[in-house]
């Protein structure tokens, strides 16, 4: 950042007055009654028109782990054996986690 050394310098009293004014402005902003809104909470409570899914049921068919699949010991996801990077049994690690 460039500095202009020819500008007149402020005295300690001027600096003190400026800092007091700045503090008063901050206090006024804090007491303005404006509430900070958490975007994440606002997104959770957002309801789209015509999107009432309260009567819907989610049905998912769960399939047991197949013989050609393994569970990664790091990410705990079930992968196909072609994704096996190293290890066997409980110490298997997928290519993504290696």
Image: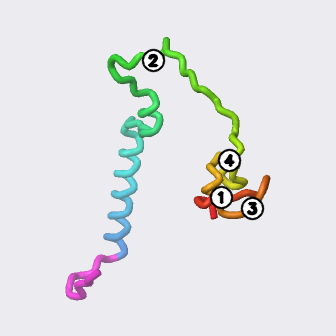
Tell which of 5 and 95 is nearer to you: 95
Residue assigned mark 1: 84
Disc nearest the viewer among 3 and 2: 3
Local packing at callout 3 (Cα closer than 10 Å; few below 14, some 14-19, many 20+) is few
Q: Which mark is residue 52?
A: none
Q: Position of residue 64 (x, y in %)?
A: 69, 35
Q: Position of residue 86 (x, y in %)?
A: 70, 64
Tell which of 14 and 75 is nearer to you: 75
Q: Position of residue 43 (x, y in %)?
A: 42, 34
Residue assigned mark 4: 68
- The Cα–Cα distance between marks 3 and 1, rounded to whole angstroms, is 8 Å
Disc nearest the viewer among 4 and 2: 4
Magenta extent: 1-11
Q: Which mark is residue 53?
A: 2
- The Cα–Cα distance between marks 3 and 4, rounded to whole angstroms, is 15 Å
Looking at the magenta stretch, what is its main secondary structure?
loop
- The Cα–Cα distance between marks 3 and 2, rounded to whole angstroms, is 44 Å
Pointer 4 and pointer 2: residues touching (CB < 8 Å)?
A: no
- Determine the residue located farthest toward the bottom in the rendered image: 5
């Amino acid at each position: 950042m460039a500095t202009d050394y020819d500008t007149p310098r402020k005295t300690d009293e001027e600096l003190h007055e400026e800092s007091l004014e700045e503090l008063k402005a901050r206090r006024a902003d804090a007491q303005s009654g404006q509430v900070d809104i958490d975007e994440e909470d606002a997104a959770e409570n957002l309801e789209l028109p015509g999107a009432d899914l309260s009567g819907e049921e989610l049905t998912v068919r769960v399939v047991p782990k197949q013989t050609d699949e393994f569970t990664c010991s790091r990410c705990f996801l079930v992968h196909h054996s072609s994704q096996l990077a190293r290890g066997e049994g409980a110490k298997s690690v997928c290519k993504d986690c290696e």
